[in-house]
Amino acid sequence: MDDQNKNLILATALSFLVVVVWIWLNPIEEPQPPADTVASETTAEGAVPTVTADAPATSTATAPPAETIIEAPRVAIKTPEFDGSISLRGGRIDDLSLTQYRETQDADAETVTLFRPIGEADAYFTLFGWAGLEGITAIPGPDTIWSLESGETLTPDSPVTLVWDNGAGQIFRNEISVDDSFMFTFAQSVENMGGTIRARPYGLLQRNGEPSDLKNFFILHEGLVRMSDGELQEVDYDEMVDYPVVATENTKAERIEVAENGWIGFTDHYWMTTLIPEQGQPFASVASYFKDEKIYWSVAKLPVQTVATGETATVTTQVFAGAKEWEAIRHYQNEQGVEGFLDSIDWGWFFFMTKPIFWLLHNINILIGNMGWSIICLTLIIKALVLPLAYKSYVSMAKMKELQPEMEKLKESAGDDKQAMQQGMMKLYKDNKVNPASGCLPILLQIPIFFSLYKVIFVTIELRHAPWLGWITDLSAPDPSSILNLFGLLPWSVPEVGSIFFIFSLGILPIILGISMWLQQKLNPAPTDPTQKMIFAWMPWVFMFMLGSFASGLVLYWIANNTITFVQQYLIMRSHGSKPDLFGNITSSFKRSPKTAAANEDKKPKGKK
């Protein structure tokens, strides 16, 4: 096998490697049933009290009997991004919808629900409290009924304050405010009119079971995410199950002592909630799993507060709850000093490429206002940046084509002497200053770019439900058109995404992709070598089926890349005196070779023409 065959097969194998794995590794949903109770987190001093569905918390706080707790009063939340309410039972934010996002693109689709109260499927909420240590007989627990001291509706312009008096000389307050984006601020305070007390404030995010829409896709992280003094940690839900046991066999946890800056929370595909203690102070970052109830906790345990008689202690913690919008998260990192907050977006192993690619795509979209055209412009810029390398590659390929007659002569003269053949080929390459491997370089460079753009399109919310034109209304989803119903002309549905038959439901974009690859091949005559000819003949159509189920934004990028490559290669070949016979190469591909025609003639019965 000569060097051209080796290079071609290597390049083809590497290209297939990028897409084959993604096709067969589909997202798997593994919903967990909601649980109702959770045990206490008892690591370190100051245990976080129990959160329960139908009974008071296990704490010294006074609470009415369980049978009288039906539904506590609520305080409405109204902001440009949120619609929800705060339950005065525990001061929980357990009802929160994102008004700017809908579950689907249907006109009557429901808004995305982030927090849900206990008792509903996928219960998910945040609350703030105190763990008593010394000198205090009663603290507010997760089921304590607070009173509304000030404010009526939580808006960006009107905070609310919750108050609870333990009747033993301590008055607890939670002042809650929210900005016009996705950040809540909790100012916890205790006013002490009794003897000296020591208490530890905490913030808690509780998730009852894994989310029902969990993707479990290898390219996406969903689960715990936290930053601890500059070190990012991403832990899947099934990895939290393997945490070391603490306190009881039911309780598993991992605790990190943060010296200055950090945050902890849960991340979904497009949504995230994180507890952000005031930057510059220490806190304990605790992630817990309660295996009997299948409940997950993210806890920020703040430093112990010693409060003398007549004093008031106040601590502040922020809660990000919302969409992982790049602009918003960057604002909180750069303007409010939340260290490493942009890393909460899952940029992956190729972060050094995915970050700048998204930054460029985002800024192009600001100018153009359409993500589809922005992807095409991004492709133009990338192709311009790699043009010097591509130019050298195409020039080398043109020279290799010019050397083809001499290489054939060398093969004939060398015969079966492989060593002489190799030596002669190397001398021929050296004399003509040709690098036989240079033809693979554009493909090798294309692989990390392709992977990085795939990551960007898959994980960033800016591509979710982003339209291009016509029938492409969501660049993060596959092309919705299908050849199986003649692109909507026939009145029947097509296989759903995820079905094994969806691969045959080719849309318009994948078909254009296959044609663009096929036309790119026709810039050169079909190879005479049977191995090369077979690979070239099948490659466009195999890629067409393989990429048919990919995000339409990625297929659009590939089409734009093929089109630009076609133009580049055509112009470079013309500049070196080689005029591609595109039409002739296309027509010749439909003709039988003389050898095949003669073989077919021999197979005909005698006496027939």
Image (spheres, helix red, strand yellow):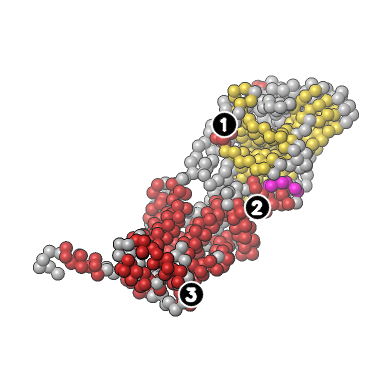
Please say if 121 is above or below 247: below
Please say if 419 is above or below 237: below
Could you tell me which secondary element the residue under label 2 belongs to?
Answer: helix
Give yes or no for residue 172 being in the magenta stretch: no
Residue 489: image x %, image y %? 40, 59
| Residue named by callout 3 | 571
CA distance separating discs 1 and 3: 59 Å
- Residue visible at 36% across and 69% down in the picture: 407
* Nearest the eye: 608 or 63: 608
Residue 583: image x %, image y %? 37, 74
Disc 1 crowd, CA 10 A, few/some/many (<14, 14-19, 20+) = few
Q: Amino acid at mark 2?
A: Trp
| Residue named by callout 1 | 242
Which comes before the other along the chain, label 2 or label 1? 1
Magenta part of the protein: which range? 336-341
| Residue named by callout 2 | 326
Q: Amino acid at mark 1?
A: Asp
Which comes before the other along the chain, label 1 or label 3? 1
Q: Amino acid at mark 3?
A: Leu
CA distance separating discs 3 and 2: 39 Å
Give the image quarter of residue 354. bottom right
Relative to residue 135, is residue 482 drawn left or right? left
- Residue visible at 60% across and 60% down in the picture: 361
Location of the C terminus by quadrant is bottom left
Relative to residue 402, is residue 213 drawn left or right? right
